[in-house]
Image (cartoon, rainbow, N blue to C red):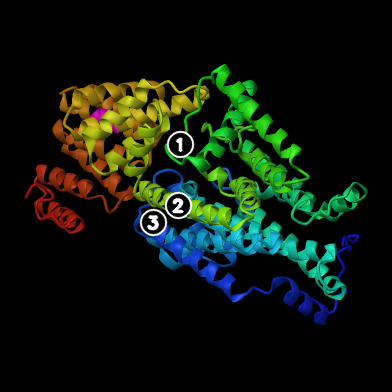
Amino acid sequence: MTTTPAAPSGNASPEAGERAAVAFAAVPRRAWHVCLALFVGTLLLFGHAATFEFVNIDDYDYVVDNPGLRLGIGLDAVHWAFTNVQSSNWHPLTWLSHALDVTLFGYEPGGHHAVNVLWHAIDGMLAFLMLRRATGAFWTSAACAALFAWHPLRAESVAWVSERKDVLSAFFFFLSLWAWAGYARATHGDGPREHARGATAAWYFAALLAFALGLLAKAMLVTLPFVLLLLDVWPFARLRRDRLGALLLEKLPFFALTAASAVATYLVQDSAGATFSSIPEALRLANAAISVVRHAGALIWPFGLSVLYPYPASWPAAAVVGAVSTILAATALATWQVRRRPWILVGWFWFLGMLVPVIGLVQVGVAAMADRYTYLPVVGLQIALLWTLRDWARNPERARIATCAVGVLLLFFAVRTWQQVGVWRSSITLFSHATEVTDANYLAYSNLGMALAAAERFPEAERSFRRVLEIDPPHFPEKTMRENDYMVRYALAVTLVRQGRYDEAGEQLARVLELVPDHLDANSHYGVILAMQGKAAAARARFETALQHQPASALAHGNLARLDLLEGNAEAAIRGYRRALELAPSDASAHCGLAQALAATGDLAASAPHRAEAVRLTGNPEACGG
């Protein structure tokens, strides 16, 4: 029987609330067994991520080099998290989660990864409890939660430390829907009315609070009020034409939070330059349609997954027409089946609606799509598919077929998940994989080169950087391309220096300095190369340029002093090295240089302490040449 929804009320008695909790939240023992299986299974599939490294995409900006996290957890950290924008994001609850990790684990990546895995395991259990409570379909809810938790599309959100916001916000998303199911069942009259009246306010405000906390973890949750409206269609069956206004009215506080979060997020990202207006609107719309189909396809065939998907110069007209036709056909099917199988419409629009903030209508960055964007939207698609399978498997024979099919699929996805998680072991494995499964991936080759150079695999790093310079990525703003070009050329020059190919390195550094004349390190490296080539005057000009732009640079003072010493001007070298040591007292090379300059003037007594200090700092008795 359907009744008019009760308005949220704060005068419910504690006894009634307790009875409602028993009526609507009691979880049988077998449900806890399913929760345990989901939890343990998730830890087994994702647990090896705890042995992984930080990766050189966002992890250093978000965690390692984030000054706010060095505060640890405390009132100062809370103030920082709520008042600062970092990496074009404002999600204070996520920052506080990272700050707690830094307090507990420091900057050892294993602990940070382990916390991501733990949150995801909890999300899987909570997804099951929410679906079971909302639909009453025990085993279908369990299968849906397992598919959510164990699918390879989850690897990016879980194995990437910087995506803590996904797993943390999902916890509050599922918690909000779980509480809303209690509210909806109470107002729906499913159970004794005195129980429903007592529970109404508690469930409502619990759902609202969880939603607010979720928005503080990730703004993508702005679509949750629309999901609540979909659930009014099915499974709660609360939607009637004469009640639409009341259903909208009860959700006004949720929509108010959505509006505030959406405006704040856009302003933060736009002011930080994260939004890209260089991509034409027509191409963004075409890419949005194609991305929907690609995301849906990845649910069934999860191969070729990449941390970065490059934006194309254009999409073929046939691909755009095919994607739009697929979306329209699926929408028409869902609408046609709304009376017989309403879960198809609910699941399909859950999937589409939750993708809207991240599908590129407002382009953030230059990626065409991202696997992490499916973390919550894909649950809707799973609902549409699994409840349709449940409807088909009404007789025992079909039920056995469906059970076997789901079991085989879960095993297949679990194997693929283990493999996909392994891709995130290090920056090298991550971006090597990205270059293998995508074409002309400018950013993947760039990050791979940086990772290889950090590992001192210089020939391989050189190949990656040269590949970057061959690619002309479409739609990159001119300023971004200019910055990327000089950074890649500088990194290439360093790899050439480390291979002893100084002439080639000099050519790249000269190009860097054409783009950025005041680049300190490029001036310094180029000056050293020029000095090695016997071009002392040109080398001095490079060092002086570096010093002109950064007069407090110990490196520039030291380089000039070294050149003075090579030219026989020991007094000038002494002054330069002393200035370098004022700026960097622990610079072993400056101590060596000063020791040599003092020795050149015959002041061996003054030279000896600096030579000894260089040995102490480096731990090498031959630090200054013996």
Which of the two discs, 2 and 3, sits closer to the camera?
2
Q: Position of residue 291 (x, y in %)?
A: 57, 33
Secondary structure type for disc 3 = helix
Task: Answer with mark 1 or mark 3, whichever residue precedes in sequence.
Answer: 3
Q: Which residue is mark 3?
A: 49
Do labels 2 and 3 touch, CB within 8 Å?
no
Q: Which residue is mark 2?
A: 408
Q: In the picture provided, is 592 more to the left or to the right than 363?
A: left
In the displayed structure, would residue 187 be above or below residue 415? below
Separation (CA) of disc 2 from disc 3: 25 Å
Residue sitting nearer the eye, 220 or 547: 220
In the displayed structure, would residue 46 be above or below residue 595? below
Secondary structure type for disc 1 = loop
Q: Amino acid at mark 1?
A: Leu
On whether residue 525 falls in the magenta region, the answer is yes
| Residue found 61% across the figure and 39% down from its top | 358
Q: Quadrant of the N terminus?
A: bottom right
| Residue found 54% across the figure and 21% down from its top | 315
Quadrant in the rendering for residue 170: bottom right
Which of the two discs, 2 and 1, sits closer to the camera?
2
Separation (CA) of disc 2 from disc 1: 30 Å
| Residue found 72% across the figure and 64% down from its top | 179
Q: Position of residue 59 (x, y in %)?
A: 44, 49
Q: In the picture provided, is 394 more to the left or to the right than 589?
A: right
Do labels 1 and 3 touch, CB within 8 Å?
no
Q: Which mark is residue 308?
A: 1
Q: Is residue 72 in view? A: no
Secondary structure type for disc 2 = helix
* Span highlighted in magenta in the image: 523-528
